[in-house]
Amino acid sequence: MTGDKEKLQSYSALEKGKKVSFGNDTLAVIKGKGTVQLKEKVKDGNVLYVDGLKYNLLSVSHMCDQGTEVIFRSNGCSVRDLDIGKTVIKGIRTPNNLYIFEEGQQQCYLSKNDEHWLWHRRLGHLSFSQIRKACKYQAVRDLPDIRIPENTICKSCQFGKKTRTNFPEKEGSASRPLELVHTDICGPSRTKSPRGEEYFILFIDNFSRMVWIGLLKHKDEAFEKIQIVQSLGRNESDHKIKCLRSDRGGEFTSNEFSISVKNME
Ligand SMILES: [Zn+2]
């Protein structure tokens, strides 16, 4: 942001200028925007002209969005272009704790508020107590004296610590073949089989995960198929179907079906 319109190249006025608010709750109107040559090879193409602004302010988040890294140290600051990996702007720290880019004609005042968070991110989201330790023992070169901020909740850290609760223990699992058999009927299918069947019934044994499939012309043939599965099971494992679990579709809940299953050998 600047209050000096003369500094802006390719200036365009904003008709319905938004307002910007400052720390002391005063508002100023954004009248236009343009480009500023910060350094020989560094341009900022989105500089706002704010009526009455006495200083030129540079937004750290805006600089970071443009592919640079802004680094604050106890004695100064620098902007590094991440593409070429080189420092493109350097600044100093004034006795009243402002960071100033004094090279060139522009003066940019930056806030130091983000410094602890910058180091938190830079050190792989290290906790502030550990960063304090690193400061105390001077374990990291160029690490400034980072104070623990009032609010230490980091959004990324919170996401990283999230875990899923365990899946509940399996309930009602079978301990032997045919103790629990799941079943369902699907159909009618669009194309009938050569023998005219248009439904199929599925049986899955809960214990062995064995699957049987039978083709049906009508849903009321379900009981016949259950009998087949019952006799197959008895031949192969010497067990009987103890419990049949379905979606309680009409084919499984009719009186005839219940009686037939009860009397099934
Ligand atoms: Zn974090």
Image (cartoon, helix red, strand yellow):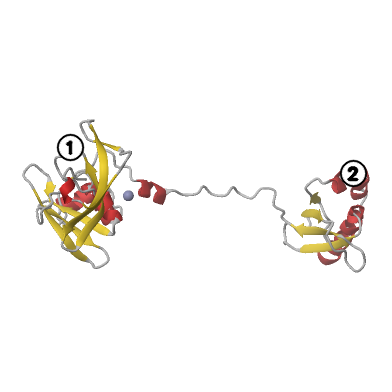
Find disc 1 in the rendering and name its residue.
52
- The picture places residue 140, in percent across and down from the top left corner, at 18, 58
Q: In this rendered view, identify the residue nearer to me: 132 or 250.
A: 250
Callout 1: SS: loop
Which mark identifies residue 193?
Answer: none
Spatial CA distance of label 2 from label 1 is 84 Å
The earlier-in-sequence mark between 2 and 1 is 1
> Residue type at mark 1?
Gly
Which residue does the image show at 90% across and 54% down from the upper left?
A: 223
The residue to which callout 2 is attached is 254
| Crowd class of label 2 (few under 14; some 14 to 19; many from 20; radius 10 Å) | few
User: In the picture, residue 147 is in which quadrant?
Assistant: top left
Question: Which is nearer the eye, 45 or 81?
Answer: 45
Q: Secondary structure at mark 2?
A: loop
Count neighbours of disc 1 (C-alpha within 10 A) and say few if under 14, some if 14 to 19, many if 20 or more.
few
Rendered view: 17 above or below 118:
above
Q: Is mark 2 within 8 Å of ligand 1?
A: no
Residue 202 is left or right of residue 93, and the answer is right
Can the viewer see residue 141? no
Residue located 16% across and 54% down the image: 143
Name the mark nearer the viewer: 2 or 1.
Answer: 1
Could you tell me the amino acid type at mark 2?
Ser
Return the residue nearer the eye: 13 or 105. 13
Pick the front one: 104 or 244: 104
Residue 10 x/y as whole percent: 24, 54
